[in-house]
Amino acid sequence: MTEPRRSSSPRAKASRNAARGSAQQWAADRKAAEQRRNRSIAKAERRTTADSVRSAEPAPTAAGRARVEDSPTPTSYTETPEGYRAGFACFVGRPNAGKSTLTNALVGAKIAITSGRPQTTRHAVRGIVHRSDAQLVVVDTPGLHRPRTLLGERLNDQVRATWSEVDVIGFCIPADQKIGPGDTYIARQLAEVRRTPKVAIVTKIDTVGKQAVGEQLLAAVELGKEVGIEWADVVPVSAVAGDQVGLLADLLVTQLPVSPPLYPGGELTDEPEQVMVAELIREAALEGVRDELPHSLAVTVEEMQPRAGRSKDRPLLDVHAILYVERQSQKAIVIGTGGARLRDVGTRARLQIEALLGTPVFLDLHVKVAKDWQRDPKQLQRLGF
Ligand SMILES: Nc1nc2c(ncn2[C@@H]2O[C@H](COP(=O)(O)OP(=O)(O)OP(=O)(O)O)[C@@H](O)[C@H]2O)c(=O)[nH]1
């Protein structure tokens, strides 16, 4: 494998200066890191997804919010060990390549929804990996694909914007599928992002034998040559079996600049709770639906409020959400005979939301038709894309 190329971005330079040890430089670096983080957060907030609509009331903070209590992340300059690294990584790859599952495996918690349906991920989710030597912020982006709708184009724009902001890019290639035109299309686009180091990741290695893994690794190297990418590393992983996930984290961390942490210790994601709740409902609704319906589904959380008048030891969180579909016929499918399917979606989503927030939940779901929202600029904007 080749020596990783050094980024010459202003941030990378600032980080290298900091590595030379001056406290003044460290402070400058920290400021740059904070500014970058704030820019990135502000951008994400502007992009509020189709799956989240803010209610007038602030979301309640629940004790069970995705975080870890005993995080090794340093809390001050004096505590930050020499050579500590922090920065952003993102995974790209065709839809269904295993990017979200890998993000969750690295973070050690479910912060991105996954499903067997392509194009499950619709917005960039940031998951935070805390280590004693580094903080790795993984940005899970939608799978890049040839766009067929305006929504598709917007998702692709989002992916490319993320590429230009991160310190390292992991290109995911599933072990169980031959490299095809979809992968080559993405690799060619990726080759245009010149300065950022790129790691080829062969995912889902638990699904095939050793020989097939070896062949896919070689195919990944060939693909790099074909499109002009010099991989910083090529690594096989299984997020489901937990195979080589730690090694992948090590490899990604070596590509990060020397920098103080970007997020406080313990936080596993900066995703607003309402967005995570909307995503869990969408995940439950995706299960078992076929054909084009998954693409037509969007979820908005309209309101999330602790039930008034409940005692502290018997809290209840009221969540009101709307599932949007594009056509009347789809509405009937989502609701099911006598409402059976929607009830089932509600039960599964409620259990996941309760696990996430650590509080009992009353979940109220409604289904509405937003005609052809994926192609309608006005509706896309209203839904946050
Ligand atoms: N056996 C196995 N299955 C995996 C592994 N990683 C992901 N999967 C499965 O592959 C499917 C797609 O995984 P996702 O993580 O949602 O894929 P993605 O690349 O984020 O998909 P998009 O959101 O469409 O871009 C899911 O059914 C996962 O359970 C793995 O390591 N092993």
Image: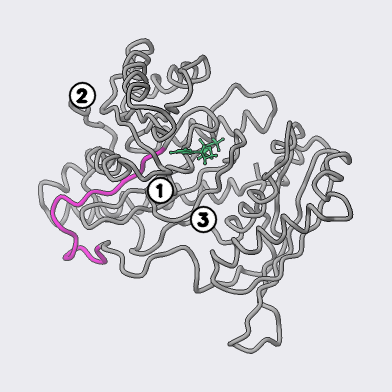
Label located before the other in sequence (3 or 1): 1
Q: Position of residue 166 (x, y in %)?
A: 37, 38
What is the spatial separation of the Cα atoms under label 2 and label 1, in whole angstroms? 25 Å
Residue that label 2 marks: 1
In the image, is residue 78 part of the stretch drawn in magenta?
yes
Q: Label 1 crowding class (10 Å Cα cut-off): few <14, some 14-19, many 20+?
A: many
In the image, is residue 37 part of the stretch drawn in magenta?
no
Left or right relative to 256: residue 111: right
Query: Which one is in front in this view, the residue at disc 2 or the one at disc 3?
Result: 2
What is the spatial separation of the Cα atoms under label 3 and label 1, in whole angstroms? 17 Å
> In which quadrant is the C terminus drawn?
top right
Q: Are marks 2 and 1 in contact (CB under 8 Å)?
A: no
Mark 1 CB within 8 Å of ligand 1: yes
Residue type at tag 3: Glu
Left or right relative to 375: residue 90: left
Residue type at tag 2: Met
Q: Label 2 crowding class (10 Å Cα cut-off): few <14, some 14-19, many 20+?
A: few
Residue 271 numbered mark, or none: 3
Label 3: which secondary element: loop
Residue type at tag 1: Ala
> In which quadrant is the N terminus drawn?
top left
Mark 2 CB within 8 Å of ligand 1: no
What is the spatial separation of the Cα atoms under label 2 and label 3, in whole angstroms? 35 Å
Residue at position x 39%, y 32% in the image: 205
Residue at position x 71%, y 87% in the image: 309
Q: Position of residue 264 (x, y in %)?
A: 35, 63
Label 2: which secondary element: loop
Residue that label 1 marks: 105
The answer to whether residue 63 is above or below residue 172 is below
Label located before the other in sequence (2 or 3): 2
Which span is picked out in magenta? Answer: 74-90
Majority secondary structure of magenta residues: loop
